[in-house]
Amino acid sequence: MKISGQIKNTDSSNYPNFNTKFARDYDKEPIIIKDYNPEFAFIASMVSVPLIILMLIYFPTSKEKIIKALFCTPLLISPIVFGYWFNDRLIRFKNDKIEYLINSKLKRSIKIGQISDIK
């Protein structure tokens, strides 16, 4: 890497805190990442609602079924909406494990040794 005319080596062995007592302890200060995956899944599933409404309009069976479908769809989707928008999901990386938290409660923990090769 070249910085203002100088070449800087970014090899990890050249860092001043590499393998010293000042190295980061991930159990005390874990890396925390907010999980946005459910929001993307929710948005993708919400695309299907207008498609269902269009299918009911263009291929109607009866007006009663259309009204029931338009009334029941929000009732069925509302628990999913509240679950996605009002739950805080985090992924916490520690020295020996990865933890998945929902509303600061541990839901899943994976030890680093259990993770197989990622291709």
Image: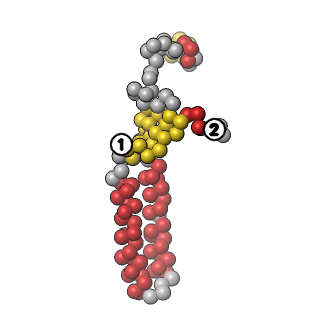
Give the quadrant of the N terminus. top right
Three-letter code for the amino acid on which mark 2 is drawn: Ser
User: What residue is shown at x 43% (from left), y 84% (from top)?
Assistant: 65
Q: Nearer the viewer, residue 97 or 119?
A: 97
User: What residue is shown at x 54% (from left), y 12% (from top)?
Assistant: 14
User: What residue is shown at x 48% (from left), y 87% (from top)?
Assistant: 61
Q: CA distance from mark 2 to mark 1?
A: 27 Å
Q: Position of residue 38 (x, y in %)?
A: 45, 52
Q: Residues within 10 Å of mark 1 (few under 14, many from 20)?
A: few
Q: Is residue 84 above or below residue 2?
A: below
Q: Is residue 56 above or below residue 40?
A: below
Scheme by which the image is coloured: secondary structure
Element carrying mark 1: loop
The furthest residue to the bottom: 62
Give the quadrant of the C terminus. top right
The mark that comes first in sequence, 2 or 1, is: 1
The reply, left or right, for residue 98 in relation to residue 80 is: right
The reply, left or right, for residue 14 in relation to residue 25 is: right
Give the quarter of the image for residue 66. Answer: bottom left
Label placed on residue 58:
none
Q: Position of residue 72 (x, y in %)?
A: 38, 75
The reply, left or right, for residue 67 in relation to residue 118 is: left
Q: Nearer the viewer, residue 110 or 1?
A: 110
Q: Is residue 66 above or below residue 7?
A: below
Label placed on residue 116:
2
Give the quarter of the image for residue 49. Answer: bottom left
Three-letter code for the amino acid on which mark 1 is drawn: Ser
Q: What residue does disc 1 label?
A: 104
Q: Nearer the viewer, residue 66 or 4?
A: 66
Q: Is residue 47 above or below residue 3?
A: below
Q: Position of residue 45 (x, y in %)?
A: 47, 62
